[in-house]
Amino acid sequence: MSARGSDPYRANRFCVSCKALPALGFTEVRGLSVDVTIAAENASRSAPDEATNDCRPVAASMAASTPEQRETDSPKLELCRGVTDDQALWTWLHDWLAGKVTPQDVRICLLDNRGTPATGWICRTAIPVRWVGPTLVADRATVAMETLELAHRGIDRIADLETCCDGAASD
């Protein structure tokens, strides 16, 4: 536990903000991750010794890699919410296709038990790449959900938590 005595934080209180979208309440955010790969020239040195099943050569070659040999990638960010009359997600996707909007930074802020931003991430230059509508099933009483997938150029931590979720509704 930290000196603040409030972490770990619960994953169910967060907010999402983006200048291209009005304040929207999302029920789920997926895809906050970064994958690091080592350039191919180290691949031949990074295979484990099959005779001894020793993985130390792998760790040694990874540790010896230079920053220029390391590449990062992040999966698409998925924003999920219940279907409403609001068509902002749909409109953003179609405006992007029509060339009417530019890539946007998307901020995701984890809130503490008082609703204050505790930590946050920013997905840089995000663009909508897929909208998934609800699965409609007549014999279930569930909420109809929609998902907007966003491609982006990487994730950073947000330093200035005071502006973390400006204009966003908290969930």
Image (cartoon, rainbow, N blue to C red):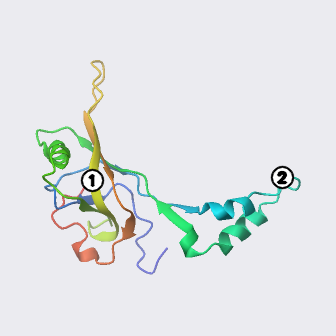
> Is 159 left or right of 75, judged from the image as shown?
left
Q: Foreground residue, 113 or 161?
A: 161
**Measured along the vertical axis of the image, is residue 43 above or below residue 65?**
above
Cα distance, mark 2 to mark 1?
43 Å
Q: Which mark is residue 127?
A: 1
Residue 70 appears at what percent x and percent y?
55, 68
Taking the view exactly as shown, the residue that stands out farthest to the top is 139
Taking the view exactly as shown, the residue that stands out farthest to the front is 41
Viewer can see residue 34: no
Going 41% across and 52% down the picture, which residue do you hit? 31
Specify the quadrant of the image occupied by residue 69: bottom right
What secondary structure is marked by label 2? loop
Q: Residues within 10 Å of mark 1 (few under 14, many from 20)?
A: many
Going 24% across and 76% down the picture, which residue do you hit? 162
Residue 1 appears at what percent x and percent y?
49, 73
Specify the quadrant of the image occupied by residue 47: bottom right
Image quarter in which the C terminus is found: bottom left
Q: Amino acid at mark 1?
A: Ile
> Is 76 left or right of 166, judged from the image as shown?
right
Disc 2 target residue: 50
Q: Residues within 10 Å of mark 2 (few under 14, many from 20)?
A: few
**Measured along the vertical axis of the image, is residue 61 above or below residue 150?**
below
